[in-house]
Amino acid sequence: MQLAESNFLVPNGTFFVELIIFLIVLGVIWTFVVPSVTKVLDEREAMIDQTVKDQRNANKGFDDAESEYNDGVRNARAEAGAIRDDARATGRAAMEEQKQRATAEAEALTRQETEQLRGAGEASAAAARSDLAPLSATLASRVLGFDVTQDPQLKAELDQINRDSVVKN
């Protein structure tokens, strides 16, 4: 027996008492502590699962909202492009209308001014023709050195020349 007392590998009475106390403590822990810890862990796991579900739903909602936003932006850009194109077309039409109106006004003004100039030219020509007889008589008198209006034959010839120039013009 002495061998058994000195050998620590051979169990003695203390070992069995310690084993019984250990089993009692283990039973108490298993009965009272483990269920509450398991309950807390299960609640935490359920909370984590719910958080993951909520995160997935939030991501799906975010993806849906982002896709809806992108569709809205795309539609708004298309609508803005259509509005811009309509505005450009309207602007071009207005510019063409203004251009045509300005061209018509310019043509009318040109015709009016041409008629006025033609009338003024004809009036000037008539005035020049009426002044032609006295001027030609004065010129002939200076060149010839005597007054040609006093000579009836030269006066008749000057009158004939004046009449012919009026008829030609």
Image (tube, rainbow, N blue to C red):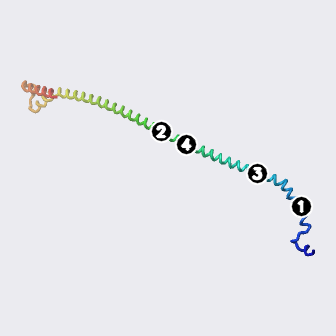
Which of labels 2 and 4 is toward the front?
4
Between 97 and 156, which is closer to the camera in this rendering?
97
Q: Nearer the viewer, mark 2 or mark 3?
A: 3
Which residue carries the number 4 mark?
71
* Residue at the image point whose x is 88% and y is 73% from the top: 7
Mark 1 residue type: Ile
Q: CA distance from mark 2 to mark 1?
A: 88 Å
Amino acid found under the numbered disc labelled 2: Ala
The x and y percentages for residue 151 are: 7, 25
Q: Nearer the viewer, mark 2 or mark 1?
A: 1
Q: Which mark is residue 42?
A: 3
Lower sequence index among marks 2 and 4: 4
User: Do the numbered discs 2 and 4 sit on residues whose CB atoms are within 8 Å?
Assistant: no
Q: In this rendering, would 3 be left or right of 116? A: right
At mark 3, the secondary structure is helix
Q: Look at the numbered disc 1 and give the secondary structure of its residue.
A: helix
Badge 1: few (under 14), some or many (20 or more) residues near its Cα, within 10 Å? few
Q: Which residue is mark 1?
A: 21
Q: Earlier in the sequence, mark 1 or mark 4?
A: 1
Percent coordinates x, y for residue 90 in the rendering: 43, 35
Residue indicated by mark 2: 82
Instruction: Check disc 4 and give the amino acid type.
Output: Asp
